[in-house]
Image (tube, grey):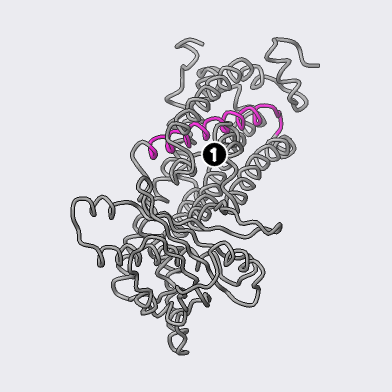
Amino acid sequence: MNKGDFRGFKQVFLFEFMTGIKKTSFKVFLLILCAMAFFVSPILILIGNMHGDKDSGNGKKEKSSIESVYVYDETDLLIDYDLLRKKALYKEVSFIKDNKMSYEDASAKLKEDSNHNNLVIKTEYDKKNGFDVTIVTSKKSDIKDSELTKFQKDYSDFYRAEVLKNLDVSKNDYEYLSKDINVEVMTSSKNGTFAKESKGISMDDYFIMIAGLMVVFMLINMSASNVATSIATEKSSRVIEFLLTGTRPLALLLGKISARLLETLITTVAVYSSYYLSQIFCLILEADNLPASGTQGEIMAVASIWETITISKLLIAVVYFLAGLILFSIIGALTGASVSKLDELQDAFKTYSFFLVACVYVDMFLIIMMLRSADFGFFQNFCAICPITGAFITPALVLTGKISTMTGFFALMVIIITVVVVYIFAAAVYESMLLYQGKRLKIKDVVTLMKKQVVE
């Protein structure tokens, strides 16, 4: 490749871009995406408020399904658990300190007790690690995971407040009090043993990654399909032969991909701008209409969704998304160039679509598994680093912190190298494919063209 191979790039780029953004389909599609991004969160909050008002009108009060908590405190601190019961949520929960049986016996009994929703809590202090709180529960109980998570936080806050209230703060005491309170949930298994439960991702992260996967898939598929359709149409109408008189094939390929890339970038910026405005609207909605308790979690998720995002993560995610878009646009261009007639494009797209959907299903399987457990580190890193699967999920994994910034940077380097290799491959066969007229080229025929052999 040399500078002359890109002759005519500017003209192709401007023509494709201006034609694309003037299409009614593009404007309608952009309007629908922006409307969805803006209205989804406010609608969910409004529905939650209506549900909360309905419960309030029926006189329903928030109540914990936890019945009794057996407390084993080995710190020698005076903790008043009746203060925790002052919360309406735990008003009917019994905190039992004078236990006749040992912690081990109480934990063993818990797995056999299926008639009550009880917990066993053991609190220890270690000079190195600080406070260690172990909460033992049984899978037979009706205590939901969300309720148990809330109890962990409430108990940690309560316990720290009690420690601060009952101790004289000195230099040594400050070091004692500054230690973190670590809460570990032990869940009974089928064989009767207790083990630390491997928690999966939160529902907020799950919906963010699923939504991100679907949006990226839609944008990549739209861009690649537009490139393929444009090239197939020009080949079918023989316009391509006229274009090639003043434009080099690589300039034609790069101009079309760049135009689609800019269209997608405009769409992405518009959608995320709408989403950001939606967050501002949600904050105004929260201020004007105090939400019911059932919607507080939703509002907190809306307000804190950007807390874990840094400039480096955002930069890696954006560049990775663009690299994935370029990668599949090149594949789409080769798909469009492999046909001589427009009516053959649908048949050619079957293999491409199957390949695209298979990659998305692999990523979707990963997200669903991550919701259940966090023990998918190798598979998660594989999907993030592999370019064909990472194009759809890596940006979301980076932004939500499910993979480290270093892993995200390494995945970015891998996909950039892949794009360069695929582009060199496309450069080797693209011109021959554009000038070829005949039966639809298959993968083996494309390989033959790359080897400069004749396709029968």
Q: Is residue 200 left or right of residue 335?
A: left
Q: Residue furthest right?
A: 456
Which portion, as a residue range, is magenta? 313-341
Tally the numbered discs: 1
Element under label 1?
helix
Q: Is residue 51 visible?
A: no
Q: x and y percent of residue 242 in the render? A: 57, 22
What secondary structure is the magenta-colored segment mainly?
helix
Q: Is residue 294 left or right of residue 245?
A: left
Of residues 80 and 454, which is closer to you in this image? Answer: 80
| Quadrant position of the C terminus in the picture | top right
Which residue is label 1 attached to?
A: 223
- The amino acid beneath tag 1 is Ser
Q: x and y percent of residue 214 in the render? A: 56, 49
Q: Residues within 10 Å of mark 1 (few under 14, many from 20)?
A: many
251 in relation to 198, above or below: above
Q: Quadrant of residue 84?
A: bottom left
Q: Residue at x 32, y 62 (%)?
A: 160
Q: Residue at x 44, y 59 (%)?
A: 35
Q: Residue at x 36, y 45 (%)?
A: 128
Q: Say whether residue 442 is magenta.
A: no
365 in relation to 12, above or below: below
Q: Say whether residue 319 is magenta.
A: yes
